[in-house]
Image: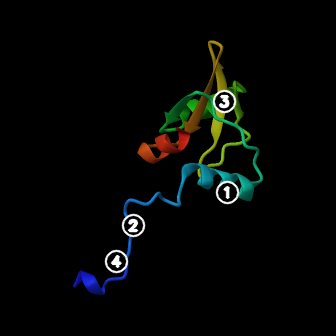
């Protein structure tokens, strides 16, 4: 039965994926006309968004100008001399991989 299905046949499962993170980010930046700027070395996923909201409300954080995600924003704040990126309303491994 699987011989009649087109998807599992003719695939090279050892080949490198065409969906590379760098390519996806480059295209998102191009489509949204964003600068190519790295994220801070320290990032925090804020599942309920309380920290990101507090930073925005108090003026202690600034939006990252090159954050290429279509569904979230990254707020940059200073914590004891270290830039920290905070992504509000972000949950789980997919967001962790995006930030990394």
Q: CA distance from mark 4 to mark 1?
A: 30 Å
For disc 3, the marked residue is: 76
Above or below 3: residue 59: above
Q: Please report contact status of discs 2 and 1: CB closer than 8 Å, yes or no.
A: no
For disc 1, the marked residue is: 27
For disc 4, the marked residue is: 9
Q: CA distance from mark 2 to mark 1?
A: 25 Å
Q: CA distance from mark 1 to mark 3?
A: 23 Å
Q: Nearer the viewer, residue 11 or 73?
A: 11
Secondary structure under tag 3 reads: strand
Q: CA distance from mark 3 to mark 2?
A: 41 Å
Res 94 label: none
At x 68%, y 32%, the residue is 56
Q: Nearer the viewer, residue 78 or 97?
A: 97
At x 29%, y 87%, the residue is 4
For disc 2, the marked residue is: 12
Q: Please report contact status of discs 1 and 3: CB closer than 8 Å, yes or no.
A: no
Q: Please state which of the two labelled residues, at mark 2 or mark 1, is closer to the viewer.
A: 2
């Amino acid at each position: 039965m699987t011989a009649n299905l087109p998807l599992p046949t003719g695939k090279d499962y050892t080949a490198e994926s065409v969906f590379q993170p760098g390519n996806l980010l480059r295209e998102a930046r191009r489509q949204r006309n964003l600068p190519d700027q790295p994220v801070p070395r320290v990032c925090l996923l804020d599942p309920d968004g309380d920290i990101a909201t507090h930073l925005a409300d108090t003026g202690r954080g600034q939006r990252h100008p090159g954050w290429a995600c279509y569904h979230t924003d990254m707020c940059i704040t200073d914590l004891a001399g270290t830039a920290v990126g905070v992504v509000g309303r972000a949950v789980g491994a997919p967001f962790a991989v995006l930030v990394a």
